[in-house]
Amino acid sequence: MWEGLLYADIRVRWPEAYAARGAHLGAVPPPGGESFSASGARLGGCIRGILARTEGDIALISHAGAGRGWLAPLLGLNPDDVLSIRQPWGGISELTWSRGRFTVDCLGLQPDPVPPPFLLEALLDRQEAPPAVRTHGEAVARTALALADPIPEPPVDRPLLEAACRLHDIAKGSPDHARRGARLLYLADKLVQGSEPTCLEARFAASLKKCETPSARAAWERRYRAARDILDEYQLNWGQTQ
């Protein structure tokens, strides 16, 4: 009933409900709606069901209100303090489930094209990268940044370059890790048109229109077959990408 209305209008039309919700924000729902606590309890039931039938890491997309309602008791907060829980649009919260309970590792991180230093370390830790791989990555980063120093325009994205250098051998020890990473990069490039996700056929159909000679069409066919082979291998081993 309150959807799309200004708080000033709500306060005039529903003064008692507005006052009650203001006093107990987490527990009192808006008319015809659901409270933070109730939606959090519902989300908690959903998560328990997922845990019962799933192994490994889980990515869950949720409304911020339900997320706050679920997180409040995990953090030991009064339900009325739910808005103190950072849940920005597109934010990421990470929790660990162990021995029948959750621990909150981080709250409301927002996506960043460059992983911050602590996340670089966490990624290396997760892959159990040995000290030699870490020190090599750091040395490569220093060398790459030195090479970038004299380049004036366009400026090199130094934080991104450093992160890429530190992580470039993260899967070292896995069979053919460099080639596999390169193939995934090639495939990912062909699954994006400009800045928008697309399918392989649509991506290549658009580029075929630009091929006006037999040699251009032959080169197009080689690129398409290479991407198609990588996609087929990926789908066979790890599932769908589109």
Image (cartoon, rainbow, N blue to C red):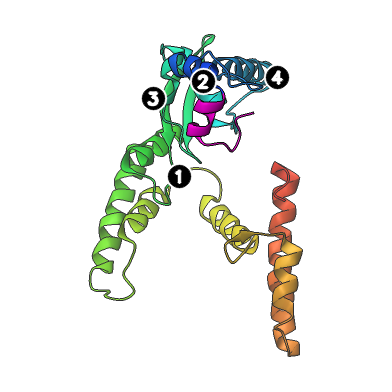
Give the residue at mark 2: 15
**Secondary structure beneath label 3:** helix
Q: Position of residue 223 (x, y in %)?
A: 68, 71
Numbered label attached to residue 53: 4
Which residue is pictured at 44% across the width and 14% down the height?
23
Whether 210 is drawn above or below 203: the answer is: below
Q: N-terminal of the two: label 4 or label 3?
A: 4
Q: Nearer the viewer, mark 2 or mark 1?
A: 2
Whether 29 is drawn above or below 88: the answer is: above
> Which region shows up in magenta?
1-13
Whether 237 is drawn above or below 59: the answer is: below
Spatial distance from mark 2 to mark 1, Cα to Cα?
39 Å
Give the residue at mark 1: 111
Spatial distance from mark 4 to mark 1, Cα to Cα?
28 Å
Q: Give the left or right position of residue 41, taking residue 119 as reference.
A: right
Callout 4 environment at 10 Å: few (<14), some (14 to 19), or many (20+)?
few
Q: Are marks 2 and 3 in contact (CB under 8 Å)?
A: no
Q: Are marks 2 and 1 in contact (CB under 8 Å)?
A: no
